[in-house]
Image (cartoon, helix red, strand yellow):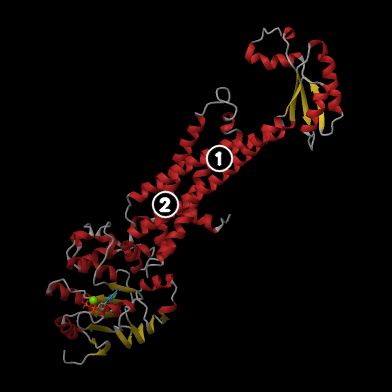
Amino acid sequence: MKLPKPIARAVALMSPDARSDRVVPPSGHTAWLTLFTAAAMTFLCVFAIALSLASGRLAGRWSDAMARTSTIRLAAPPAQMDQQTEAILTLLAATPGVDSARALTDEENRALLEPWFGPELPIEELPLPRLIEVTEGDPGYDAEGLRQRLSAEAPGAVLDDHTRWRRPLAEAASKLRLLGLLSIVLIGTAMAAMVTLAASASLEANAQVVRVLRLVGARDQYIARAFVRRFTLRAFAGSCVGAVAGLIGILFLPGADTAGAFLTGLGFTGWSWLLPFILPPLVGLVAFFSTRTAALRKLREFR
Amino acid sequence: MIAFESAAYNYGGGELLSDVTLKLAPGSFHFLTGPSGSGKTTFLKLAYAELLPTAGHVTIFDREVKSLPRDDVANLRRRIGVVHQDVQFLDHLPLAANVQLPLTVAGRRSETGDLGELLKWVGLSHLADALPPSLSGGERQRAALARAIIMGPDVILADEPTGNVDWEMSLRLLTLLVELNRMGKTILIATHDLNLIRQAKNQIPTRVLRISKRRIQLAGVDL
Ligand SMILES: Nc1ncnc2c1ncn2[C@@H]1O[C@H](COP(=O)(O)OP(=O)(O)OP(=O)(O)O)[C@@H](O)[C@H]1O
Ligand SMILES: [Mg+2]
């Protein structure tokens, strides 16, 4: 099997026999800088990915299922309750943009209230409002018009229009996802920039070494390889640390039962647990190409 | 091997070398003299393509240096052994590794016997494991000469190779260079040391180039 050239090169770079490594002195602070940068950036990236995935899911859920339903709350004297419910349902059936509508049963009411009042609630004896669930069609109904007709039909009916507050939320969620994706791109670019800077600084600091190597007949590729290999390995190692740290962080986020509804989504689910593991090789690749470009450009300053 | 054709060089001020036309024929042995600051080192840098002529042409192994790609410059330097006036090494590697560096970067293995022999010749066997910063000036020059010839280059350019060593060691290094010349290598030595030139003339036919008034001329026999 023949590997594509850049990949073959990257593989060759990782092989233990890289004699060119020794000709460059072990460098001090740029090594740590690269390691730390890669670790920190990967750590941030794990969260950015988690955030994008979660807000993506949230946006999907809110805009699809929930935003299509609204509720009408009907408060009426017990005697008129059934009659007014009937009237409202009839009205809704004739309203354009309403897909379907139904009154919640007592069991459903009980299920809604149970978390607050416990299971022994004598629901039949309470003057509870009746809830009517309206499923919107596409395009939706005219909320103002519906409100007016409702007040004529049943003065105690209130249209609780979920879409009013959920639509902006869904929009915010998808914007959040966009921001998350943008963060990932920015993090990647910033990392490439920092690794490039570190590699350039390292070449600068080793100017004498480079000069000697050129004078004894070393090709640019050879010199570059010594630097590139180092920075790639360092970035990869740092990224592994960052990815593991990020995953641990996500693992220790409160689960769905303990935290509020918004945060429940912020973990990974299913196959997306694998995403953080793609980061180290990706970071290595970014480091490889950015140091290679930096090194080959810098080397042109030496005859 | 190396040919200058109306070549000139200036560092940005006035012209330092003007209208240099000469050939280093294969197997020749040249000395280059001239006052300090006259441009000997500059001439050598032109001869191994560290500098490009600002006018005229320099050809090395029949290739015009101005149009050489970087990798070809590297390849060309593997065939030219250079001893620099300000010798530089990789300070983190021991002397032996530094001497072998041209082989290392060319991806060639050295026979350890050759290295030992060479270090013995230049009197550095006992310092094979020493780091360059701990070497004396003369030791550095000898190490540089060893590094210059380990690849078996066709041309050897040496800038004041005996500048820091005693007369006895100078003669020893000269003998080494004369031997190499007898094997067919082309040699050019920049030096102030007229005694060294006289000594060489006793052993082998040499030509002496002198820089004066920005030109390079063949010096007479009156040295
Ligand atoms: N990089 C440079 N930039 C500007 N001027 C330079 C540079 N290198 C050398 N020069 C000048 O060029 C002139 C010739 O320098 P060069 O080193 O060639 O002289 P040299 O003949 O080797 O002298 P020496 O015998 O002292 O080694 C000197 O006046 C020097 O100051
Ligand atoms: Mg000089």
Instruction: Determine which quarter of the picture holds residue A39.
Output: top left
Specify few, some or many for label 2: CA neighbours under 10 Å numbering under 14, 14-19, or 20 or more. Answer: many
Front residue of this view, candidates A194 and A117: A117
Residue occupied by mark 2: A231
Q: Which chain does the numbered disc 1 sit on?
A: A
Measured as percent of width and height from the top left, residue A167 is found at 68, 35
Residue at image location 40% in from the left, 64% down from the top: A299
For numbered disc 1, what is the local secondary structure? helix
Residue at (75% x, 8% y) in the render: A124
Which residue is tagged 1?
A49
Q: Locate the N terminus of chain A by quadrant.
A: bottom right
Labelled pair 1, 2 in contact (Cβ < 8 Å): no
Give the vertical position of B101 relative to A158 (above or below): below
Q: Which mark is residue A89?
A: none
Callout 2: SS: helix
Near mark 1 (Cα within 10 A), the count class, few <14, some 14-19 or many ≥20, is: many
Ligand 2 quadrant in view: bottom left
CA–CA distance in space, label 1 to label 2: 25 Å
Residue closest to the eye, A58 or B66: A58
Q: Earlier in the sequence, mark 1 or mark 2?
A: 1
| Residue beneath the point at 19% across and 77% down | B174
- For the question of whether residue A85 can be seen, the reply is yes
Return the chain for callout 2: A
